[in-house]
């Protein structure tokens, strides 16, 4: 790639390569291993979306651009591949979501309905169905191939900050600026449970995550708290207190009974789900925006407002690696499927590729 573009002035650059085609901050990224030509080896493709109103699909190994998407008329906020990598979607502040064919770059559909920004989209874990939401507080569920609205979910009193399908794909969960988390039946659009009120968050809920091993949803709040709730029974299970600033993001470990949460208090906290107690605090030098579990190891990666990323071993409670190179806030990152590395995106207009192999 075009190394050095947008890097911190004369600062260290631990990245393997830089993608520097965007002309504004890069806000979202997805990575998927796909077979583009039958009989050939699979390649890792990357989608990046930016404030420059474009998304690029590019080859991770070579940096070569496959597709340039210019259909959005505002910032591209969310991108993602479907379960088998045959399609991908891009969504933006213009309220539009487009679905594309990965092999040809052809547009399958425009997913419409949102009257305000689309701030996030998620694919169904097994079906070609897209979930999306944003500023108007309505969650939409679309059929990807033709853009048909399958259902919409109304009830939140403010914009949606996050949403997802449960791991089995049978339940939808949304979070909102209205300080609540709602659980929905995808078929009937009925709200089956509402987590809200005096025993729940007292300010905006910024993000949610589901456990792969139980029907627990974790929520991250502007009120500095993390809550664990059961989306099957509707019961609030625990309030995890420790952060001293708004909690931005959280994730369940892929390999241990741990939850990790990150906040503007410059920490990632590790919670033991056996006892719902704080196991460790990883200190950072700036507010932490995102934390995600390694697909295989008891490690998580975090990204911070100072442009740094860290590999955090939450079994040993040690920082395995600090990675620098970005010259501004890192908004997001996505692992390669084997977990050997990841791609991060930043306000410095670049995406960067980092390796975790020697961590």
Image (spheres, rainbow, N blue to C red):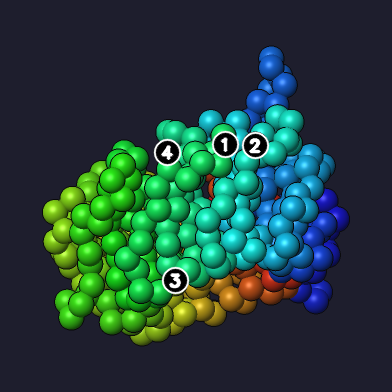
Q: How far apart are labels 2 and 3 at the CA level?
A: 27 Å
Q: Which mark is residue 125?
A: 4
Q: Residues within 10 Å of mark 2 (few under 14, many from 20)?
A: some
Label 1 vs label 4: CA separation? 19 Å
Find residue 108 and name its label. 2
Q: CA distance from mark 1 to mark 3?
A: 26 Å
Mark 4 → mark 2, Cα distance in angstroms: 19 Å
Q: Position of residue 357 (x, y in %)?
A: 58, 45
Where residue 7 sits in the image (x, y, percent)? 77, 69
Q: Residue at x 42, y 33 (%)?
A: 126
Residue drawn at 82 percent across, 51 percent down: 1
- Of the residues under marks 1 and 2, which one precedes in the sequence? 2
In this rendering, the count of numbered labels is: 4
Q: Indicate which disc, 1 or 3, sits on the residue closer to the N terminus.
A: 1
**Mark number, residue 246:** none
- Residue placed under numbered mark 3 in the picture: 159
Is any part of residue 90 visible from this angle?
yes
């Amino acid at each position: 790639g075009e190394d050095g573009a947008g890097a911190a002035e004369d600062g260290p650059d631990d990245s393997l390569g830089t993608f520097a085609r965007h002309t504004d901050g890069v806000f979202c990224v997805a990575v998927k291993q796909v077979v583009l030509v039958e009989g050939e080896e699979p390649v890792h493709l990357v989608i990046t979306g930016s404030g420059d109103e474009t998304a690029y699909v590019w080859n991770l190994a070579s940096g070569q651009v496959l597709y340039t998407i210019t259909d959005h008329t505002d910032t591209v906020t969310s991108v993602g591949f479907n379960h088998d990598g045959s399609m991908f979607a891009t969504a933006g502040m213009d309220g539009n979501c487009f679905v594309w064919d990965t092999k040809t770059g052809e547009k399958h559909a425009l997913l419409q309905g949102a009257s305000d920004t689309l701030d996030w989209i998620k694919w169904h874990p097994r079906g070609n169905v897209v979930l999306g939401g944003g500023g108007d507080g309505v969650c939409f569920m679309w059929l990807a191939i033709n853009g048909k609205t399958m259902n919409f979910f109304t009830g939140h009193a403010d914009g949606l900050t996050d949403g997802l399908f449960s791991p089995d794909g049978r339940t939808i969960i949304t979070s909102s600026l209205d300080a609540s988390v709602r659980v929905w039946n995808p078929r009937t659009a009925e709200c089956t449970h509402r987590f809200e009120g005096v025993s729940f968050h007292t300010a905006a809920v910024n993000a949610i995550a589901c456990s792969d091993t139980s029907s627990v949803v974790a929520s991250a709040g502007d009120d500095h708290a993390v809550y664990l709730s059961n989306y099957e029974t509707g019961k609030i299970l625990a309030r995890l207190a420790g952060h001293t600033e708004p909690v931005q993001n959280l994730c369940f470990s892929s390999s241990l009974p741990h939850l990790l949460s990150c906040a503007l208090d410059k920490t990632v906290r590790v919670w033991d789900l056996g006892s719902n107690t704080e196991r460790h605090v990883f200190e950072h030098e700036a507010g932490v925006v995102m934390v995600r579990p390694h697909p295989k190891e008891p490690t998580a990666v975090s990204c911070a407002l100072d442009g740094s990323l860290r590999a955090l071993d939450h079994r040993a409670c040690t920082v395995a690696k600090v990675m620098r190179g970005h010259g501004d806030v890192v908004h997001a990152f996505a692992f390669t499927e084997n977990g050997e590395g990841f791609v991060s995106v930043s306000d410095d207009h670049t995406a960067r590729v980092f390796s975790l192999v020697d961590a």
